[in-house]
């Protein structure tokens, strides 16, 4: 992981496509491009930063590899903070691999996963919350997730944690001043009151961040949702209606779906990772039996169960048994009566916790979506939700250190000069979030999740 090495890699997927990009970053980036690139215009000789140059690149024997655009970015005004070159080639895996060969021959080393971003972090271009926001931005699959990750990339969480750290430093300084000059005219009870108020405020902020974790994770990762019900109740029809496409096979024959079908559905700010399953029933069919076993496995990992019932039949005995089973699971579930187009709704007993739909005629779907939203999103979603377990754990550490501090103040047994230790622990916990306190292991762990080109 030597920092003075110039690193390079193909940063776009290796498939035939419009363009493929190679990035080179480090002290020798400009020297290396000079050896393989022939610019059409002599203005290239000026090597102006943030300019694009058209020309050709060549292999070791001087054979032409491609006509390319070369983008020069002089450090520190680049993503990594180092001299950086991007070569925009045609999206041909052969060209890109040949170009990489000649770049490596000329002294660069192939970058490791996340190494460009790691360098950006080590060179002070980003803190850890911003670095991790890049990964979230790449994986975001809905607008809210994108807004949260882009805010974090801009520094929203960095600033928030920064403000908490500053408050803590202020309190530590105040505490130490009152320890060092105990005879000053500041009353002890007054000191404790001031400190307590400030700690309460800090804890309040930390609790708010901790409380945003569940929502943050749901927004980022989606809700694992499974649709269950007896055969023929219309599970696959509902999947297709929600997706707006004919994804699953639908027939009038019970037992049509045998294997689980996984799809993603966006409903507002939420993504459902939804699974259509084999309807549960007693069967001798081996394939269907395996499908039903799978249904139960999905129920185990589900965060939401959509339980479909055929409105023309009402709650059958099997449905009632299933319902009893669901109630014991302590999971979120929604009961959906399907095929309401075939009944007269006044003829049946309705209830607030049952949603009536017609999957076939696409009615009642909005009610279903709204109920799902209500189950998972209680309040307006803040734009700085945390969704990362690392932040959550560090905030829990900071919180318990502050709780300990308050206990100590209250109990008055802890000597005054030891009181600051808990505050310093809280500070360190916050500092690991932003990365002013880090170990190589922590960085390895974070950046190994990135792709090779990032
Ligand atoms: N009238 C009416 N028919 C429906 C509705 N939803 C589904 N159906 C019909 O019910 C039959 C079964 O639908 P599917 O979606 O295949 O049911 P399923 O629950 O996936 O069945 P399995 O895969 O066998 O477990 C098909 O003939 C559908 O056209 C509805 O809202 N109204
Ligand atoms: Mg089906």
Image: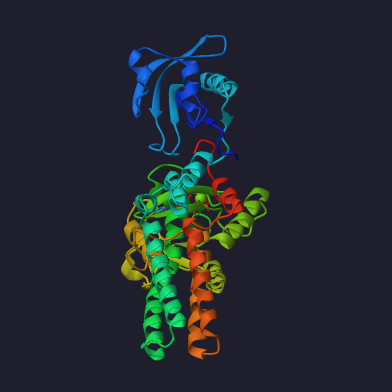
Could you tell me residue 398's position as x and y percent? 50, 70
Identified at 52% across, 67% down, the residue is 319
Could you tell me residue 428's position as x and y percent? 51, 65
Could you tell me residue 239's position as x and y percent? 44, 50
Q: Quadrant of residue 343?
A: bottom left
Could you tell me residue 298's position as x and y percent? 57, 57
Exactly how many numbered labels are in the figure?
Answer: 0
Above/below status of 36 relative to 142: above
Identified at 65% across, 52% down, the residue is 290
Above/below status of 394 relative to 22: below
The coloring applied to the image is rainbow
Give the quarter of the figure containing the N terminus.
top right
Q: Quadrant of residue 90?
A: top left
Tell me, yes or no, if residue 312 can be seen here. no
Q: Quadrant of residue 322?
A: bottom right
Viewer-proximal residue, 258 or 300?
Answer: 300
Above/below status of 350 relative to 11: below
Viewer-proximal residue, 130 or 179?
Answer: 179
Tell me, yes or no, if residue 36 can be seen here. yes
Viewer-proximal residue, 31 or 356?
Answer: 31
């Amino acid at each position: 992981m030597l920092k003075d090495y110039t690193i390079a890699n193909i940063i776009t997927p290796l498939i035939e496509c419009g363009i493929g990009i190679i990035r080179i970053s480090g002290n020798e980036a400009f020297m290396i491009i000079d050896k393989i690139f022939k610019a059409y215009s002599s203005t290239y000789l000026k090597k102006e930063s943030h300019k694009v140059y058209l020309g050709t690149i060549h292999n070791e024997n001087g054979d032409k590899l491609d006509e390319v655009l070369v983008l020069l970015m002089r450090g520190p005004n680049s993503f990594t903070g180092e001299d950086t070159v991007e070569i925009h080639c045609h999206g041909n895996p052969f060209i890109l691999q040949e170009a990489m060969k000649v770049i490596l021959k000329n002294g660069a080393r192939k970058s490791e996963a996340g190494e460009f971003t790691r360098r950006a972090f080590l060179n002070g271009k980003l803190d850890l919350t911003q670095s991790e926001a890049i990964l979230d931005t790449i994986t975001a699959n809905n607008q809210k997730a994108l807004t949260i990750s882009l805010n974090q990339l801009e520094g929203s969480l960095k600033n928030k944690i920064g403000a908490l750290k500053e408050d803590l430093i202020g309190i530590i300084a105040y505490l130490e001043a009152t320890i060092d000059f105990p005879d000053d005219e500041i009353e002890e009870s007054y000191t404790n009151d001031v400190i307590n108020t400030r700690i309460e405020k800090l804890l309040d902020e930390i609790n708010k961040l901790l409380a945003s974790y569940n929502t943050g994770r749901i927004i980022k990762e989606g809700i694992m949702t499974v649709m269950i019900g007896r055969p023929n109740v219309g599970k696959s029809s509902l999947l297709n209606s929600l997706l707006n496409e004919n994804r699953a096979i639908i027939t009038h024959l019970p037992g049509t779906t045998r294997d689980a079908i996984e799809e993603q559905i966006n409903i507002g700010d939420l993504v459902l990772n939804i699974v259509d399953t084999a309807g549960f029933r007693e069967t001798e069919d081996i394939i269907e039996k395996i499908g039903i076993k799978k249904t139960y496995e999905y129920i185990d990992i589900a965060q939401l169960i959509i339980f479909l019932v055929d409105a023309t039949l009402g709650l059958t005995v099997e449905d009632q048994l299933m319902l009893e089973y669901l109630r014991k699971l302590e999971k979120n579930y929604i009961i959906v009566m399907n095929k309401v187009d075939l009944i007269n709704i006044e003829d049946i007993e309705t209830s607030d916790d049952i949603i009536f739909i017609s999957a076939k005629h696409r009615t009642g779907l909005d009610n279903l979506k709204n109920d799902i939203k209500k189950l998972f999103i209680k309040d307006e979603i803040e734009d700085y939700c945390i969704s990362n377990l690392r932040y959550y754990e560090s905030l829990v550490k900071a919180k318990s250190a502050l709780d300990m501090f308050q206990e100590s103040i209250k109990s008055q047994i802890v000597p005054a000069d030891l009181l600051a230790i808990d505050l310093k622990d809280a500070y360190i916990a916050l500092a690991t979030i932003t990365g002013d306190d880090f170990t190589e292991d922590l960085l390895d762990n974070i950046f190994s999740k990135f792709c090779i080109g990032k």
